């Protein structure tokens, strides 16, 4: 379980980089940003996925910090 949480905290494992970009921009925890995003998709899959992929198109590409 601890390995799973550590992988969620690591912003290098990305799908589109939406949650990592938002966490970086607003100085949020990457783990909790991903948890909230996953809950949004779980509660309303159509709306959650639509918002996620619209943000993936609108937000600038997230670059890993040096």
Image: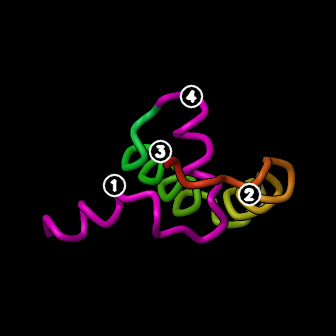
Residue drawn where x is 66% and y is 53% of the image = 62
The quadrant in which residue 32 appears is: top left
Q: Label 4 belongs to which residue?
A: 26
> Tag 3, which secondary structure?
helix
Q: Earlier in the sequence, mark 1 or mark 2?
A: 1
The quadrant in which residue 43 appears is: bottom right
Is residue 3 covered in magenta?
Answer: yes
Residue extending farthest front: 66
Q: Label 3 belongs to which residue?
A: 33
Is residue 7 covered in magenta?
Answer: yes
Q: Earlier in the sequence, mark 3 or mark 4?
A: 4
The percent coordinates of residue 33 (x first, y second) are 47, 45
- Specify start and end residues of the magenta stretch as a single range: 1-27
Q: Label 2 belongs to which residue?
A: 47
- Foreground mark, 3 or 1, reads 1
Question: Mark 2: few, some, or many residues within 10 Å (few <14, many ≥20)?
Answer: few
Question: Mark 3: few, some, or many residues within 10 Å (few <14, many ≥20)?
Answer: many
- Foreground mark, 1 or 2, reads 1
- Foreground mark, 4 or 2, reads 4
Q: CA distance from mark 4 to mark 2?
A: 22 Å
Q: Which of the two residues, 56 or 63, is positioned nearer the viewer here? A: 63
Q: Label 1 belongs to which residue?
A: 9
Mark 1–mark 4 CB contact (< 8 Å): no
> Tag 4, which secondary structure?
helix
């Amino acid at each position: 379980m601890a390995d799973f949480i550590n992988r969620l905290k690591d912003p290098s494992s990305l799908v589109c980089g939406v949650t990592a970009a938002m966490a970086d921009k607003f100085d949020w925890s990457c783990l909790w940003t991903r948890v909230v995003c996953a809950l949004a998709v779980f509660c309303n899959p159509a709306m959650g996925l639509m918002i996620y992929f619209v943000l993936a198109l609108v937000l600038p590409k997230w670059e890993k910090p040096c």
